[in-house]
Image: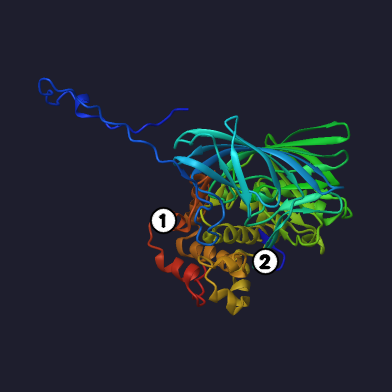
Amino acid sequence: MRLRGLRLGTGLLLAVVLGPAACSSAAPEPSGQRATPSPTPSRQFKPGGAGVGDAYFPGYGNAGYDVTRYTVKVRYDPAKDRLSGTTTVQATATVDLSSFNLDLVGLTVRAVTVDGAPARHAHADGELVVTPAAGLTSGNGFTAEIGYDGTPEPLRNEDLGEGGFRHTSDGAVALGQPESASTWFPVNDHPSDKAAYDFEITVPEGLTAVSNGVPVGNSTRAGWTTWKWAERSPMASYLSAVAIGKFRVTRGEHKGRPVFSAVTTKLPKGAGDASVARTIEVADYLEGVFGPYPFDAYGGVVVSEPGIGYALETQSRPVYSATFFRRGENTGVVAHELAHQWFGNSVALARWQDIWLNEGMATYAEWLWEEHRSGRTVRQSFDMVYAGSSGEVWRTPPGRPGAANLFSESVYQRGAMTVHALRTTVGDRVFFELLRTWAADKRDGNATTAEFVALAERVSGRQLDALFDAWLYGTERPARPAAR
């Protein structure tokens, strides 16, 4: 995410205990006695956890299963601000479950089935608890289908602001970090459980509904248009989005992948259109630095809505606030959000504490793009930030910022300075090899700071604890790294 206020940039598995009679070497039973077969241990089915235990947001997500795919079919009527939908969740139990939870905020659940059979459910305080007719065995797949409707409500976080589904003057936007998906479909809302997604979004004829991934087509019937999208690469739930309204749409193709961008007609044609039109140029530059572009589609969406003053790296198609283009063309923010496609999206967080891996890398990509575009060197960008950063940046360790400081300047700017300090320490050849290796080895997965540090030490052949301790976890300004 780029903040407006920042300057720079079935196989059933059974555990069976074999008795002595099952072993060829066992002694024979005494004459006249019968062997008593060993009992098969009974399974202990338990409820899944209402939260994955993230240290910063313990209630986010749910434990006990792993989702492989969501199929989200919703119909939204802006005139009434009413949404109705059916979401199908394909998942695998990771423990023996008597029930499991999904995150769903502000909507009313009408019906739930599991593997085609009706299931009991309870819904309160954003937690949907589903109790199937029979327990779900660890290692086995299951399919849950949830029907729901209501008036969507955004989520409000005292420290992090508002996110989620919000009604607009010509439609709606569902967007936000660290959570937003649960305001319009039931979901395991934590980045550690990535999944594929299919979206079918039905809106009044004349409106466009833009979402993630490859555009699969649209069709109109009886005054309603259904827009279909498919994101086949694993995606963290907060990276899902929908923008419904009137847009100037541009379509194309690049390297065999579709390009679909949309700019709200609330803005006169201008800097927003021109900036998003350079998406391919920026993506190709970053591909030369980080390795192959990781997704099946390109694009961008520009919205103009009160309360959305940020850009977000929604997968394959970032969303930008119009505020970024008030002073003219801005490809720096495009570089930031596209860099996230590698760092933050393809390689996603395992826990929110490590968000500097996303934002520090993306901010550094802004510096790289600025050097490529204008000639201002990365070192000059580093020096400007190093000299101009407030004391709060140095008092807030980006590797351990705390939940309230998740999107603080330290995470972005000191995170990027950490990346540059690493580069000056290991040298350019090792540094860029490290970035490409990280993006390739962790593609479509999740990662932690500890894993990044371990890879940096392996690729460089150097012990780097002192560097990362000072730049990520210290509370004083580290010494300025020597120029190379």
Residue that sits furthest to the front in the current view: 32
Q: Position of residue 402 (x, y in %)?
A: 54, 67
Q: Is residue 194 left or right of residue 139?
A: right
Q: Identify the residue under disc 2.
A: 8
Q: Position of residue 238 (x, y in %)?
A: 63, 51
Mark 1 or mark 2, which is nearer the start of the sequence? Answer: 2
Q: Is residue 249 above or below residue 156?
A: above
Describe the colour scheme in one phrase. Answer: rainbow
Q: Position of residue 232 (x, y in %)?
A: 62, 37
Task: Give the residue at x 28% y 32%.
Answer: 17
Q: Is residue 309 left or right of residue 464?
A: right
The circle on residue 47 is none
Q: Identify the residue under disc 1.
A: 454
Give me the C-alpha separation between circle 2 and circle 1.
29 Å
- Res 258 quadrant in image: top right
Amino acid found under the numbered disc labelled 1: Ala
Q: Is residue 256 left or right of residue 443?
A: right
- Assess disc 2: are there few (<14), some (14-19) or many (≥20) residues with their C-alpha within 10 Å of its C-alpha: many
Q: Is residue 287 above or below residue 312?
A: above
Instruction: Inspect this view and state whether residue 379 appears.
Output: no
Q: Nearer the viewer, residue 384 or 409?
A: 409
Instruction: Inspect this view and state whether residue 17 appears.
Output: yes
- Assess disc 1: are there few (<14), some (14-19) or many (≥20) residues with their C-alpha within 10 Å of its C-alpha: some
Q: Quarter holding the N terminus?
A: bottom right
Q: Is residue 109 left or right of residue 478?
A: right
Q: Find numbered disc 1 in the image and state the secondary structure of the residue it sits on.
A: helix
Q: Find numbered disc 2 in the image and state the secondary structure of the residue it sits on.
A: loop
Q: Position of residue 44 (x, y in %)?
A: 40, 41
Task: Give the residue at x 59% y 64%.
Answer: 406
Amino acid found under the numbered disc labelled 2: Leu
Q: Nearer the viewer, residue 342 or 13?
A: 13
